[in-house]
Image (cartoon, grey):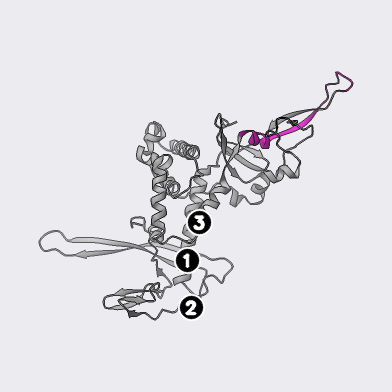
């Protein structure tokens, strides 16, 4: 089953097993293993993609929407569209590494390898195939591959956790990431998983004896899912959920008062840069620039947040979360411009709008 590329399997969850009385008796060898009853597939069951099925131990899989959910909410079930794809496999792998090194240990090496291989196939349709020859580790670099799947992943995860504790990370970021990861990636006993993927229908008795019993045939239900890339889906969902929450936090702290009092909140983020030029009589003129980002609440037309009353006390500015030192005085950290744009203070969020800026 693992070798069926581009295919997902219809799977019963534990609750659906109880509802339709389809118990797994593999843990009790003395019991009858196969019930003589029909078990037809249903559209309400979920779809899963097998990632790794070892000879011994638990199998790893990825979950996605079932057929009924896909029909009812295609926007939330289909693969997200990437408007600016990475120009190389290494760039795509670097994006996965940024998520994998943040403590996402449920996204196994098999899911990462499949995602990179699928992206390599996508690039090969637009590039010279000779540019993409070689194994995955050589394409992305040994150091990056170790960060994705090896011991380097554990090391980077520990370092990132330590940095996030003193950085501008969102409250509950680790718990939110673990919850999103558990919704997609799971592991299961191979025997139980095969039972959840199995269905059976009546093929009648053989009528060779007077007491011949009804016979049933088992099968699995496959559904094409070529665009389901679990590692990429998790990475994009984790990344842009964080960005959306960071933008919301910035809007609450520095945006209009009624920014969250509308049914649908629309926020804009843009990168900005300021060019500096200094004439040098002894040689060429010096020039440099600084980059940043700004935001605007498109869905709000209310009044701006009142500026805090900043004061200097005991060697620092107060309140410390809204005021900064400027020369010999204290000024508000963020001001709403007349055109309703405000500067982004969060370095991680500013790096989204201005990629050249270090996070």
Q: How far apart are the alpha carbons under marks 3 and 1?
A: 12 Å
In which image quadrant can residue 322 be found? bottom left
Which region shows up in magenta? 190-211
Q: Position of residue 1 (x, y in %)?
A: 60, 31
Q: Secondary structure at mark 1?
A: helix
Q: Look at mark 3 in the image and give the residue it sits on.
A: 241
Residue placed most toward the observer, 19 or 243? 19
Q: Relative to 316, is 222 above or below?
A: above
Q: Residue at x 48, y 78 (%)?
A: 303
Q: How far apart are the alpha carbons under marks 2 and 1?
A: 18 Å
Q: Residue at x 60, y 39 (%)?
A: 188
Q: How far apart are the alpha carbons under marks 3 and 2?
A: 27 Å
Q: Position of residue 13 (x, y in %)?
A: 67, 43
Q: Is residue 14 left or right of residue 150?
A: right
Q: Look at mark 2 in the image and give the residue it sits on.
A: 303
| Precedes in sequence: disc 2 or disc 1 | 1
Q: Which mark is residue 310?
A: none
Q: Relative to 59, is 311 above or below?
A: below
| Precedes in sequence: disc 3 or disc 1 | 3
Residue placed most toward the observer, 91 or 39? 39
Q: Is residue 74 left or right of residue 148?
A: right
Q: Look at mark 1 in the image and give the residue it sits on.
A: 249
| Precedes in sequence: disc 3 or disc 2 | 3
Residue 87 appearing in the image: no
Asked if labels 1 and 3 touch by Cβ distance under 8 angstroms, the answer is no
Residue 100 appearing in the image: yes
């Amino acid at each position: 089953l693992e070798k069926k590329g581009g295919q997902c399997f219809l799977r019963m969850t534990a609750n659906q097993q109880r509802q339709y009385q389809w118990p797994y008796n593999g843990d009790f060898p003395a019991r009858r293993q196969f019930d003589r009853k029909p078990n037809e597939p249903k559209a309400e069951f979920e779809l899963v993609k097998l990632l790794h099925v070892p000879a011994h131990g638990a199998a790893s899989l990825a979950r996605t929407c079932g057929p009924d959910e896909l029909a009812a909410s295609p926007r939330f079930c289909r693969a997200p569209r990437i408007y600016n794809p990475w120009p190389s496999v290494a760039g795509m792998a670097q994006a996965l590494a940024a998520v994998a090194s943040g403590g996402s240990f449920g996204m196994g090496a098999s899911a990462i390898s499949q995602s990179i291989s699928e992206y390599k196939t996508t690039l090969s349709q637009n590039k010279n195939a000779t540019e993409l020859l070689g194994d995955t580790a050589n394409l992305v670099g040994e150091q990056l591959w170790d960060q994705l799947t090896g011991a380097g992943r554990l090391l980077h995860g520990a370092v990132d956790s330590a940095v996030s504790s003193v950085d501008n990370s969102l409250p509950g970021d680790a718990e939110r990431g673990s919850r999103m990861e558990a919704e997609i990636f799971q592991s299961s006993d191979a025997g139980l998983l095969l039972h959840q993927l199995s269905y059976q229908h009546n093929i009648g008795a053989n009528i060779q004896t007077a007491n011949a019993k009804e016979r049933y045939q088992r099968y699995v239900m496959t559904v094409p899912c070529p665009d389901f890339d679990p590692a990429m889906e998790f990475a994009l969902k984790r990344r842009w959920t964080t960005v959306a929450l960071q933008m919301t936090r910035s809007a609450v702290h520095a945006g209009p008062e009624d920014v969250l009092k509308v049914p649908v909140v629309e926020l804009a983020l843009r990168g900005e840069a300021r060019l500096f030029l200094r004439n040098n009589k002894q040689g060429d003129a010096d020039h440099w620039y600084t980059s940043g980002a700004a935001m605007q609440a498109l869905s709000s037309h209310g009044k701006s947040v009142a500026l805090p009353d900043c004061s200097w006390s005991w060697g620092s500015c107060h309140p410390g979360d809204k005021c900064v030192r400027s020369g010999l005085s204290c000024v508000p950290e963020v001001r709403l411009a007349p055109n309703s744009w405000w500067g982004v203070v969060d370095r991680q969020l500013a790096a989204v709008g201005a990629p050249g800026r270090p996070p």
